[in-house]
Amino acid sequence: MTDNKQFRARANMVYVTIVLFAFAIAVKLFTIQIAEGEKWLAKAGTVSTTYRTVQPDRGHIYSEDGRLLATSVPEYEVRMDMMASGLTNELFRDNIDSLSERLAVLFGDRSATEYKRDLTDARHRKERYHLIKRRADHTQVQQLRRFPLFRLGRYKGGLLTEKRTVRVHPFGRLASRSVGYVLRDSTTLGLEGGYDQWLRGVTGRRLERRLTGGVWMPVDNGDGVDPVPGSDIHTTIDINLQDVADAALERQLIKHGAQYGTVVVMEVGTGYIKAISNLTRRNDSTYVEDLNYAVAHATEPGSTFKLASLMVGFEDGTIKPTDTVDTRNGQVRYYNRIMRDSHEGGYGRITVQRAFEVSSNTGISVAVHKAYQQDPKRFVEGLKRMGLHQATGVRIPGEATPTMRSPGEKGWSGVSLPWMSIGYETALTPLQVLSFYNAVANNGRMMRPQFVDHVSRNGKVVERMPPQVINPRICSESTLAIVHRMLRGVVDTGTAVNLRAAHFAIAGKTGTAQVAKNGSYKEHGLSYQASFVGYFPADAPKYSCIVVVNGPTMSGYYGNVVAGPIFKEIADKIYSNRIELQQQTHLAVVDGPRTPVSLSGHSADLRTALEGLGVAISVEGESEWVTTEAGDSTVVLKPRGIPADAMDRVPNVLGMGLRDALYILENRGLRVKVQGNGMVKRQSLQPGSKAFQGSTITIELT
């Protein structure tokens, strides 16, 4: 009996507990649904739906002539709402076969059977945001909208497309590293970073719903804010010249088995960059643009720095170009180090000017050491007055700051002065060296390197980027006159005689620097850096250029052999395509009557006209089309290579009149757009490039 009472008491206790627990649940449900209903409904809405940021399309980046260097291309993620309100089982079953077949043909990544199985399984799982294709282009999406089921629209057919943009470079690697990139974390490089405030646009927002698995699906409620696309920037890069510079650099890098190289072409008067190429060798021995050495990589410049060293002495009056120096059999000791000339045995006693022209290390260092050994700080201050210790401020993120020690600072020693005088114990980027030489060419005015001419929006200019002066005068006119002669002498009779051009003069300086491999001389040994920097035409400079090649391993390593040919090829191409640079546009001054300057054109027509004027003619070879050159007493007719059998190539019509240019171009099947009048100054399609029937070519006359 006692046991029954105990059992009954325990049962009652369990029963009461269950009742109380059920009552507590009922109270809680009442509280959540009635008393706190609005609160939890609002919170649920914010968890499942929210306004999310929508990125705008970035602005375009154009070349000088309006061709796209970087643009945003739409890319779509294609999904399907398997539980769309109008998508019935019968509708799905009747169209799944034909839809699968069309998808298989369009994308070609899976068979129709695989597509059908995938879509059917997703239907069974009741997926609201099923992925069909991750990267579809605009054309494919347009076709998708005409497919079975999808043509019925989003709510009946279930088609969902989410647009995003990707950045592409239509010209491939040409200037790609300088044009820049936008990384996945929104980090920007190159011009993309320097001009991001114009390119990025204004973000928008839209309502999206969070689905299972953390996927967000757009909800079209009409309350979103559309993003505002970015503005466009128009660079100063000449894409035709860029192609020439890139190809010339690659050929020399391959020929010499070099590690990397860079080339930059600048317009003297403005500082505008016309071409820039940075190529690095990969493990498979091909070259790619992945690092901007011209802007971000500071190294010991070597002999190209000798110009600055002598200019300090010329300005201070401590060195004269006519001073004689003893090159001491090509070796001179400074404390515990021996400096050597590349020329075995040295050059004997020569003038400072000649020491510069033949790039004598001993000659230059002896002159500078003699002038400043008692006051080396004065030498460094002279370099700083010319701005060589400061970055150029080019609007590309990551420009390296020059390294230039002064007496009393860490690292300065008794050998610092002579070694600095020939380009060691200091570091500059190729762009900083070029800016200095460009200032010499520009009558002492140093310009800030610039890549962008203006910013536009919807075809209208919204901001211009005029040339900027860094230093209005780096030295006196007398010093400029001296160094102009010296730089001309380097090419005429010095280390760069192989760069002499037949039709125009080049001024510049070679450089061959020893550099440590991987930052260590002792562990990894020596490598070499070959360079050439200068300007042309020497008498009236229009363009400056620097070429730097690092780590050549074959066929020589000197600047005139490795870097010089790249400079000359670029200079020749610019000269041939810039009619204003050509000597034939100038009248020769003679005692008798001047010969007329005539346009290039048809040989027979020119002969008839010149003979009718009583002008003497000199013919160099027979050709239907000729280039004219005004001599002292005759007009020279030189053959112009426009072969009739090369109908698939763009002919060179520079320097011709409109009638002849139209005749030649239209016979090639090209559509011609004409700007201006007079003589053809520029053509938009590079001579010798592939000519496609019906392509448009713009010729600019002046």
Image (tube, rainbow, N blue to C red):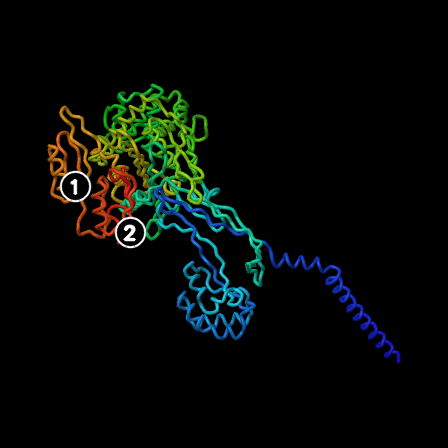
- For mark 1, what is the residue? 626
Q: Amino acid at mark 1?
A: Val
Decide which of 189, 89 is in the foreground and name it.
89
The percent position of residue 60, horizontal first and vertical second, equals 42, 47
For the N terminus, the quadrant is bottom right
Mark 1 packing: few (<14 Cα in 10 Å), some, or many (20+)? many
Label number found at residue 13: none
Q: Quadrant of residue 462?
A: top left
Is residue 23 toward the left or the right of residue 579 in the image? right
Q: Quadrant of residue 145?
A: bottom left
Q: Are marks 2 and 1 in contact (CB under 8 Å)?
A: no
Residue plotted at (39% across, 35% down) = 449
Q: Quadrant of residue 455?
A: top left
Whether residue 300 is visible: yes
Secondary structure of residue under mark 2:
loop
- For mark 2, what is the residue? 695
Whether residue 190 is visible: no
- N-terminal of the two: label 2 or label 1? 1
Residue lying furthest bottom: 1
Secondary structure of residue under mark 1:
strand
Q: Amino acid at mark 2?
A: Ser
The percent position of residue 533, horizontal first and vertical second, equals 31, 35
Q: Marks 2/1: CA distance?
A: 25 Å
The percent position of residue 103, horizontal first and vertical second, equals 43, 67
Decide which of 342, 477 is in the foreground and name it.
477
